[in-house]
Image (spheres, coloured by chain):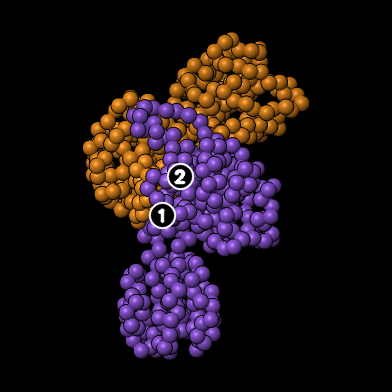
Chain colours: A orange, B purple
Amino acid sequence: MSNVTVAISPDWTIDLDIPGITVVEWDFKSPAPADKIDIAVAPHITTSDLVERVANTGTKLLQLGSIGYDPIPRNLPAGLSVANAASVHETATAEHTLSMLLYSTREFDRVQRAQEAQSWDQFDTKGLADSTVVLIGIGGVGSAIAQRLAPFETNVIRVASHRREDMYGQVYSIADLPELLPQADSVIVVVPLNKKTEGLVNDEFLSLMKDNATLVNVARGKVADTDALLKHSDRLRILVDVTDPEPLPDGHPLWEKATLVTSHLGGNTDAMIPRMNRLVRRQVGNLISGEPFVNVVLGGDRA
Amino acid sequence: MSNVTVAISPDWTIDLDIPGITVVEWDFKSPAPADKIDIAVAPHITTSDLVERVANTGTKLLQLGSIGYDPIPRNLPAGLSVANAASVHETATAEHTLSMLLYSTREFDRVQRAQEAQSWDQFDTKGLADSTVVLIGIGGVGSAIAQRLAPFETNVIRVASHRREDMYGQVYSIADLPELLPQADSVIVVVPLNKKTEGLVNDEFLSLMKDNATLVNVARGKVADTDALLKHSDRLRILVDVTDPEPLPDGHPLWEKATLVTSHLGGNTDAMIPRMNRLVRRQVGNLISGEPFVNVVLGGDRA
């Protein structure tokens, strides 16, 4: 195959200076910039209209800019595959999660108060080593978090929707949480938002956590019940990267009650650019060589 | 060998409930609590008088509570070994260092200001992934830092007093810093304090670092020149766990100029207690079995 055309959203800076590859920029709002588009690389934010945008251009792959693909309709044109951006965003979000967890376990909120008071304040913390971390969600981001936790000498208890064993050992299920949460020094929530996970972190969940334990929500705001977070914020250390409502309105009580609110910064680093480059170059290479596309989440017929 | 007597500073809670082992508490200030003390486990802070305290008790091992042993005189009585507390403190200090590094690279100082203003503030950072970290000092703590950095997809350049290769690759020397520092997004300093390292982080050193790069000092306050830190604090991100003078006086300008000042909290977690237990139990076991003591830094004759 030659004369491959790749249309790329200006959200991305992709280096595709390869003979036989034509690259066109496309914002996915104006009409398609070519009659034939083999691979369409969508904007960072996935919207429901992307599939109709690539209709009639013979597109073989719609490469999304996000891991989540909920907005995409399930009735795809024949021959179209949709791939998500797994491998692009995990790094930054896992790094952010470790930053939040360490901020809490080493009590950098107290450090910050000492610095504002300009006064030396030595104190002991329990620290992260030897502590028990319950990690709820072990998809791409959750697994990247587990990898980064591995050298910290912690006891990581992994929880997913279904109980199983994998190469790293036992995976517990959401149904096991009543026994697991009371053991946790820290709980990290990184599940996808769906009907089963909406409101998972509610009053009952938080009541099972012991005093002064840390909750980190890097999933979606609606996975936690905001009133329940506020209710338990004097007893627990609440750290959230996502909120409900989001953006968190100015002056909302969670700003004061939470140990830390980060403004949905999880994925916001330069790390996504080289990783999106690698993914798109791999997809183009696979199209040329006849290998299957990677990360295909919908469709899967090849023309 | 039986009837082993172990004298332990009340700084430590050591579980030595083993037949044939007599444990006595000793503050190392009052007279020796037994005529014969086989192993003396010193307080957390090492002082110059510890060796004379154990004179005339036939002590075979003086187990220090710290990694540093500079205060101990070099002319030891025959038969006395001095062991440092390597393996006890590295975990907590490495964990603290990662906390500081992530705080800086994910700009949690800006996050904190948004939270105080109670206002949503989304922004991008370079992040830690793909960045270059120059790690100066690869003893116990430095190696523990390198281990924890390994899953973060960073380029770690290790620097020690002498150039060499080890199982992890190239180790550069302090003399290479003029070429290395301009590449660094972050520099971590974790060298022991001695004549060669005092004032290492001076105006010349900091001038070689690029704008907005991060400096983390978890070594000793005097390894950095405080005036030089202040001079570069508008251009660099300065994070210090140790200061000169230390404690940093109330209202000292570094409180305002540094991105983060933590009050020498590096080793202050519960992690040291189980690790000191393991070390002391190993030393007792080695005495009983006739194996050499571990961590011996001075002396080394066995009675």
Q: Is residue A55 visible?
A: yes
Can you identify the residue that label 1 sits on? B247
Pinpoint the chain carrying mark 2. Answer: B
**Residue positioned 37% across, 41% down in the render:** A116
Of residue A71 and residue A234, the one placed in the foreground of this image is: A234
Which residue type carries mark 2? Leu
Question: Label 1 crowding class (10 Å Cα cut-off): few <14, some 14-19, many 20+?
Answer: some
Amino acid at pointer 1: Pro
Which percent across, then down, holds residue A8?
61, 21
Sequence-first disc among 1 and 2: 1
x and y percentages locating residue B94 in the rendered image: 48, 55
Using residue A283 as the reference point, say whether residue B84 is left or right of it. Answer: left
Q: Quarter-wise, where is residue A131 in the image?
A: bottom left
In the rendered view, tell whether residue A62 sits above or below residue B7: above
Quick one: SS at disc 1? loop
Residue located beneath label 2 in the image: B254
Classify B126 as above or below B34: above
